[in-house]
Amino acid sequence: MPISAPESPRTTEALLSVADLTAGYGTIIVLHGVNLIVHPGEIVALLGPNGAGKTTLLRAVSGLLPWSGTARFAGKSLAGSSPRDTARNGLVHVVEGHRVFTQLSVTDNLLLAGYDVPRGERHARVDEALAHFPEIAAKRADRAGALSGGPQQMLAVAQGLVRRPRLLMLDEPSAGLSPVLVDRVLSVAASLREQGTAVLLVEQLVEKALRLADRVYAMAQGKIVMEAATSEPDLPHRLERAYFGHDVATPLHP
Amino acid sequence: MKALLPYAALLAAALVLPFFANDYWAVIGARAAVYWILVAGLNLVVGYGGQLAIGWVALLTLGAYTASILVARFDLNPFIAYAAGGVVGALSGVIVGLPALRLRTFYFAMTTLGFATILTQVALSWQSVTGGGIGLPGPTLSPPFDSAWGLYFLALGLAAIVTWMTANIAASRFGRSLIAIRDAEVAAEASGISKARLLTIVFLFSGFTAGVAGGLFATLQSYITPDAFTFDLSVTFFIAILVGGRGSILGPLLGNILLTLLPEFAAPLVAWSTFLYAALLLAIVLLMPGGIAALLDFRNRKPLESHRSIVPQPDRLRALLDHGPVREDIVLRNVVLAFGGVRAIDGLDITIRAGQVHGLIGPNGSGKTTTLNVISGYYAPQEGEAFLGSRVLPHGAPQTRAALGIARTFQTPRVIGEASVLQNVMVGATVDGTASFMEAALTLPRYRSEERTLTDRAMQALSVVGLASLAAVRADRLQHSELRFVEIARALAGRPAFLLLDEPAAGLSTDEINRLGSLIKAIAAAGTGVLLVEHHADLIFDICDHVTVLNLGRELAAGTPADIRAHKEVVSAYLGA
Amino acid sequence: MLAAILAAGLAVGATYALIGVTYNIMFSASRVMSFTAGQLGMLGGVLGAMFISRLHLPILPGMVLALGGCALVGLVTEIIAVRPVLKALDQHLYVLSTLGFALMIQTFTAIEWSTEPQPFPRLIGIGEGGPWDEKFWLPVLACVATIVGLELLYRRTLVGRAFLAIAEDNFAARALGLPERNLRMASYALAGAVGGLAGFAGGELLLAFFANGSMLNFYGFIPVALGGLGNNKGAVIGGLALGVFQQAANFLMGGVVAGVAVFAVFIIVLLVAPQGLFGAPAARRV
């Protein structure tokens, strides 16, 4: 399906542009020609039912999975980039499931995120990232395994911030968190936007995502099935249709 | 018949050898035959079963010492001593082999290596019995077997018999089950294959041939010391199989001949032979995992038709699923299952009616697949029970389900890539096999007629799903969507009363989903109840008689598709609000 | 008698433990158990004897070269026997590829070095003959030094923490942008040096003998199986216990019983506690 131009026209060039991207695991193809654009400094929500391919898309873009098609970030092609290359260029992927290193301290987790940062600058970067999360700054000497789910997710996001990303891709940062913590983690995305960092957010909590994001893409069965600005009317209804497939004869809410 | 040609040629060459060669070649030929007697049995363990038994020389050692000791110290008839060596080998084969039931690849390889290491130490230290480092004489035979050519023909005859038997076993349901355990263990369990029973029989057989080979080896060597049973020799056996190719009889046979004869043709290489074999092993693993057998597999090099479509023929279902009417339902009562602190299923009651399509939907992590895994026996619930009619389904015993008439497919198709599509489907009918291992090894009539029945039934199942034209093709050449239908055919080949489908539509095109939908409806109409776990809401609403919606391990809603579509909470659960 | 058993037991035990640590370092970096672990120990002894006895180098340069050679072999293991099969879903492939490479090392050594055990040079010359002979305490010293060194590496350096990160969650480490491949190669080189140290320090006890490779493969694996994959503390305790048990059984009951007893205990422990007595580190999250 053709992708319409973004509703709020921007003069800036796209930060991330993905065109006709195909990817999968081994012989199983999950993404069938995905098109997607993220502009500098905007929050884009990527929604869709289980198994639609959202996580696969993020993994392909960050170089964790092989893919074909075109993908450009900040004017450069992403073809052949390893996760290390993309992260160095400012495209940072925080994977799902707050996978921090439980055996290491909070500080060590963050220092590792700055593995490629010059040695003298590392500690300053860690402090900078922790400034977003005073909750875990107080526990910087604790083992990451001793933190509960919410603080672990904050740590995972903070790991991404150590890189000073231009685009931060968050994969289900709310999974398994209480509503208060979800708001807390998502509020960081909003403050990042104010600093000019773009965020690509994969979320299950549609309402929260819609409230936060500037634009939204919906995926189903490995394709983008809808693209809209969050200011557009009637979004939840359109999403339902996108989720349940267009073949359902009767609308869910006539 | 064409498949027999290479064997006939090899046998003919072996039979005419005495007319061209001197006694030296009789010894070399006898050695190749003796090694093959062991390797043929080991091939079932390694090549078919995929168990990395790298220390199988230990059983050759045991057979050799048993036979030699019985003859030298107790003056037994050498043939009885060989048989005794075989029995000791068989029992030890089970003892060395059975840790494979619990231990993964490297661990098992290590235990067999450890057994071989320790056995050599024992042979060295136990001087009063084994003669220690000095050794003891091997059994000597009376005429006509006392000459070099006499022994050659004895070994050749036994090797031919062992070849015939292992080829029969490989072609039988035992061979298929072994490959299934090797490449698709989970699917093997779901098809009712008991790994413990199967491996026990195979270790017995393989240990027996190794033990007999040991006795003959002792006669061939005429004097044995622990030095004769090096780890190098063990690895040579192992490498012969891998060079030959897994899941083949001819390949390892050629590999064995090659590895035995190579040093004879290239004398300067003798010292380096093990080095070369090791390099060969590395090269095979990295460059040509199929081995010689893959080189010889011309049939699977023919390109497949590129635009093929799957056209199921549901009208053939009635003939296949000729079980009487199923009256029992699958019932889950108050099932609770937690992983760590997370309750994947939290008090679930569900009834899957015979002959109906029951849809199970819900968001990520709601417990759909977990429910399916409880019914099919992979997970044991902490509370509650699953019933079939009034019988409790035993916990954590997936291999019991096929016999109870419960078949399933998997989210990621679990098929044996190196076996043909037909063989894959026949694995699903394993539960109906009754002929014993020896009946299969000797191709007795009951086994043959049973095999014909199972083949027919598998072909029927393949026509039902629309893949009959691909029956002879290696399964790893199929497309992903075709593999999904192969799995359904495999499940149907067991003529199940219930079929559990785990996301069968994932990765299918719209056309294929529609055909899948009609096939599922036809399966239910033929009397087999279907539990369908799916994300494609449209497919669920289209074909289900009854739908259960799960959320956070509990039932959120249940009813007809129309009820569910109108259900406010379901929509919001999907939208995550 | 007791002193002799303890001295010999701790010495071989420390050697087994170091081979166990070699297995662990390679496993942590790649989830691969490599048959080259024991061969690296064998090479430590052979290369040490070659540089010091045959080529008459001083002890320290000889040791550095021997360990360096082993590190190189470790690195080559990663490149030719591990990396090509890491992507394969088939778990058995790495067993075969590392077995093939290990056999190549072993037979090459047998042909180019010697098929008979060769003497290993006397390194310092302390405690001739008694239980305080250097051949008994050198392996123990090497084991202690290795453990302390590894602990410092893991706790005090960023590279060490990166090793731990990769061991715990390879996927997350890659996603974080860690240079996973370089770290894996470094791990294999480190494992090579540790394996080489085992053979070098135990050289006076085990001699420079090509067949030590498969022997150490098995006896070095037992502590890993007992202690749990990747658990160095477990490997050291398991290795020392195995060494003392083996020597005691040997002295008291003879070789036959000792061999059978070690194997029986190994099998029973594996069957009863497949994760090892000390437990494996937290399983990787899927």
Image: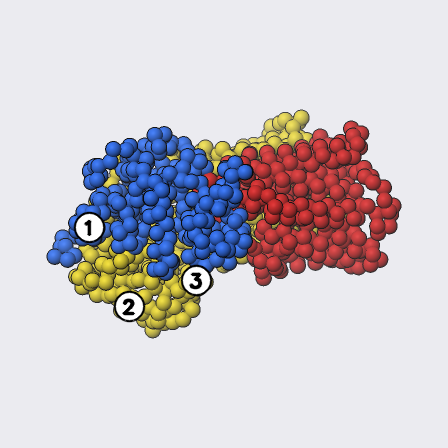
Chain colours: A blue, B yellow, C red
Q: Are marks 1 and 3 on the same chain?
A: no
Which amino acid is tagged 1?
Leu
Q: Is residue B451 left or right of residue B132?
A: left
Q: Which of B424 and C97 is in front in this view?
A: C97
Marked residue chain, label 3: B
Residue at the spot 60% in from the left edge and 35% down from the top edge: C75
Read off the residue under disc 3: B339
Which amino acid is tagged 2?
Thr
Q: How crowded is mark 3: few (under 14 residues within 10 Å), some or many (20 or more)?
A: few
Q: How crowded is mark 2: few (under 14 residues within 10 Å), some or many (20 or more)?
A: some
Q: Is residue B258 left or right of residue B410?
A: right
Residue at the spot 77% in from the left edge and 57% down from the top edge: C248
Read off the residue under disc 2: B351
Which amino acid is tagged 3?
Phe
At mark 2, the secondary structure is strand
At mark 1, the secondary structure is helix
Q: Nearer the viewer, residue A39 or A227?
A: A39
Q: Which of B120 and B10 is in front in this view?
A: B120
Q: In this view, does B274 lie above or below B187?
A: above
Residue C140 in the image: x percent, y percent? 75, 49
Read off the residue under disc 1: A235
**Mark 2 or mark 3: which is in front?**
3
- Mark seen at residue B153: none
Residue at the spot 26% in from the left edge and 58% down from the top edge: B577
- On the question of residue B82 being in view, the answer is no
At mark 3, the secondary structure is strand
Q: How many marks?
A: 3
Distance (Cα) linking label 1 and label 2: 37 Å
